[in-house]
Image: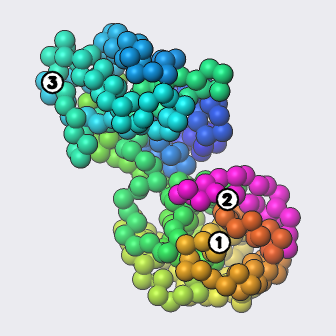
Amino acid sequence: MEAEFKRLVMRSPFQVRIEKPLREGDSTLLYPFDARIAWVAACYHRTSSRISWDLCSSEAVRLDPLYADLLPALSADDRLPGGEHLRFSVEVGSSTDFEAGPLQLRGVVKNAIVEALAPRGVAAEIDADSPDVVFVVRRAGLPEARRTVVGIDIGGGARHRRGARVAMGPAPLRETMAAQLVMLSRWDARTEPLVDPMAGGGTIPIEAVGLAVGAAIRKPQDLVFDHLAAFKDLPHDVPDLFPGTVPRILALDVDPSRIPAMVGNLRAVGLTGPSHEDSIVIAQQDLRTLKPESIERMLPASRGMKPGVFCFNPPYGVRMGGEDDKKLLALYSEMGRVFARFSGWRAACFVANPEFIEAFGHAPTMTKPATNAELRGAFLVYQF
């Protein structure tokens, strides 16, 4: 997340220096607030799960003390949205160490927000379906110093819901996970081709292109910016931040029935047509028959480039219709033999089958635990 963010801020329309973030556990980065930096994150950052602007926190673990802390803090906060009428919702993250259920926690935060806005002449009401502003609540901090944090969602909700995937395969990889996978592969779009040999709905190729050209995933007018004074003078346009980059991507799948879904998803994000015919090539191909010369034949624009990167999401044997375990392990083994033909190439994948590494037959150079839609697994990176 941090590496992607640095890259985006450097190419943003702002001359701003980004501070080193604080780390809160393994999955949260805390940056000092700057509306320009927040604008870049909300519009462009692809690997984050959610982006929020923290307002206040409390060490309370019961409802009444929490309300007593939140009300004065929110009442004195000039960052809250204004206007005569505000529709809002409250979303609660994991709160198992709070001494009340998530519905009760949501209710207390809602009441504190309504009471804090009333003296300002803002009539605030809950609207879960079409809120102007979403407030987010999370439990944060180290085990010995936990706190309840209330903030404003400025990133347009859960970031894996891009809104552009019109068709999905039986076990899709979340868009945020696909972007993280591409980043962990250290793919250089200027000098290396990228191949997804099991592309399915095309999620990995789509995220790879977005990362390569610095494409926005949210527009300012679709976010909360119009309701927050801190963002009022910031741009409304979100051009590609790396418009000169032309990625070379090959999206393959053995199943011909997946090709229309892949094309539909690429079309939905504007990645089909003459302007992209050299950038993304789609083909039906069995991974087990891949050779370096076949990639050059299907992706001629990759000739003369450095050895490339495989990014893929193999079947796990979970939620895939109960594949025979022996066949699945045999597939992993064949994949390992195929990739060994590609000297100098790297491979990156997300796998939720603990037998993959042994069957694949190669030792990963990096292993990073991760979860895809409640399915625990790991990112793996290999060098051949």
> Going by the image, does 62 lie left or right of 377?
left
Category of crowding for the residue at label 1, using alpha-carbon neighbours closer than 10 angstroms: few (below 14), some (14–19), many (at least 20):
many
In this figure, what is the number of numbered marks? 3
Query: Residue 334 in the image: x percent, y percent?
Result: 77, 83
Q: Which mark is residue 316?
A: 1
Whether pointer 3 and pointer 2 mark residues with C-beta atoms closer than 8 Å, the reply is no
SS for dot 3:
strand
Q: Mark 1 is on which residue type? A: Tyr
Secondary structure mostly taken by the magenta-highlighted segment of the chain: strand
Q: Mark 2 is on which residue type? A: Gly
Q: Mark 3 vs mark 2: which is more N-terminal?
A: 3
Q: Which mark is residue 377?
A: 2
3D distance between C-alphas at marks 1 and 3: 50 Å
Whether pointer 1 and pointer 2 mark residues with C-beta atoms closer than 8 Å, the reply is yes
Q: Mark 1 vs mark 3: which is more N-terminal?
A: 3
Tell me: residue 238, above or below residue 290: above
Verify whether residue 266 appears in magenta: no
Category of crowding for the residue at label 2, using alpha-carbon neighbours closer than 10 angstroms: few (below 14), some (14–19), many (at least 20):
some
Query: Residue 97 in the image: x percent, y percent?
Result: 55, 31
3D distance between C-alphas at marks 1 and 2: 9 Å
Q: Nearer the viewer, residue 74 or 275?
A: 74
Query: Residue 249 in the image: x percent, y percent?
Result: 59, 71
SS for dot 2:
strand
SS for dot 1:
loop
Q: Which residues are magenta?
A: 361-384
Tell me: residue 105, above or below residue 190: above
Tell me which colouring the rendered structure shows.
rainbow
Q: Nearer the viewer, residue 298 or 43?
A: 43
Q: Which mark is residue 332?
A: none
Q: Quadrant of the N terminus?
A: top right
Name the residue: 42% across, 26% down.
Answer: 150
* Residue denoted by label 3: 123
